[in-house]
Image (cartoon, grey):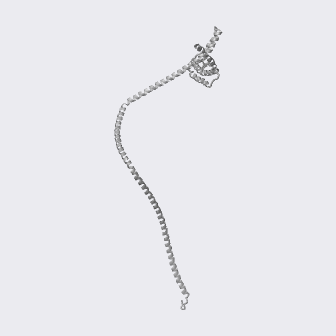
Amino acid sequence: MSEGGTITPETQIKELTEKLEEETERLLKLYAAYEQQEAELRDTKAEVEVLEKEIVEREIEKESLEALLTEKDARIRDLEMKAGKSSKQVEHLEPELQKMEEKFTREKDRLGKVFSIAEELDNDLRLAVIELQTRDDWYMEHMSLFEDLNKAIKRRYEMIEAAAEAERQSQHMGRAIAERMEEMVEARAAEMTLDEASEIESTDDSPAASPDATDAETEENEEDEWNWSESVLVGVMEKNGITDRDAFVEFAKSYDMDGNKYLKGSELGAAAVDFVAKDAPAPAEEPAEEPAEAEQTSEDKEPEVVWRNSGNSDGNQ
């Protein structure tokens, strides 16, 4: 500044420079303070985050503790209830305990008796083992005798089986012989009819016989050729209520279906049905079943064959 009060540019520049330096220094101080504040703010934020995490953890711990407390309270209540029940059960079970103690005492005494019996049985077992060993020794000494006895018993059974087999064979042979005899009897019965036919031929060839005698003998031989079972005939007649024997026999000859001139039970039964039906005015259905029964009866009785001819039967009557 000059003496006249004017400000020179140098002075003004100098003042401005000083102010700039002051403002710069102040700005640097403010920037440093700002950085310091910002660092403190970051630290504060970090502390806040840590504190928030701690708060969350504390809340979690608080909730878990509350849950534990609730669970403990529930357990305590359950334990108290169980304790109450147990006390009541103890009151009720004390008499049972006394009974169990009495039972235990009795079972203990019983077990002692059982143990004594077991000792006695053990002693008896030892004696039995000794006796068995002695018996085995005796058996080993006399084994040959038992083997001979076993062989003799086997031989006895073999002889019995052989005798039984021989008896069965003899019975079989007896049945075979009986069947053979029956076959021979049947064959002989068939030959009898052939012999009668040959006798008829011989009578026809004889020159001394008269015509009337020849006709009579021929009729008799023809009548002799018809055969039947007398017991079956009588049974069929009685079953159907037939009394005229000769008429029924003549009527039944037409029912010889096989043509062997032997009236079987079935043929006699069929003839009896028709013989009764021809005389009855109105035959009922039920009597028709009776000849079938008579037929069965006659067939059952048919093995009892009595060989007769019409001439002999007339003579017997």
Among all residues in the image, which is located at the extreme top? Answer: 208
Among all residues in the image, which is located at the extreme right? Answer: 211
With respect to residue 122, does 246 lie above or below?
A: above
Which residue is at a point 62% across and 15% down the rendered structure image? 223
- Measuring from the top left, give residue 292's x and y in whole percent: 60, 24
Asked whether 79 or 153 is in front, the reply is: 79
Asked whether 29 or 215 is in front, the reply is: 215
Is residue 204 visible in this depiction of the protein? no
- Measuring from the top left, give residue 44's x and y in whole percent: 49, 71
- Measuring from the top left, give residue 196's x and y in whole percent: 61, 14
Asked whether 91 or 60 is in front, the reply is: 91
Q: Is residue 247 left or right of residue 140?
A: right
Can you tell which quarter of the image residue 206 is in? top right
Tell me the quarter of the image containing the C terminus.
top right
Asked whether 296 or 159 is in front, the reply is: 296
Can you tell which quarter of the image residue 116 is in? top left
Which residue is at a point 42% across and 27% down the rendered structure image? 153
Is residue 15 visible in this depiction of the protein? yes
Among all residues in the image, which is located at the extreme bottom? Answer: 4
With respect to residue 64, does 91 lie above or below?
A: above
Can you tell which quarter of the image residue 247 is in? top right
With respect to residue 5, does 144 lie above or below?
A: above
Which residue is at a point 50% across and 76% down the rendered structure image? 33
How many numbered marks appear? 0
Tell me the quarter of the image containing the N terminus.
bottom right
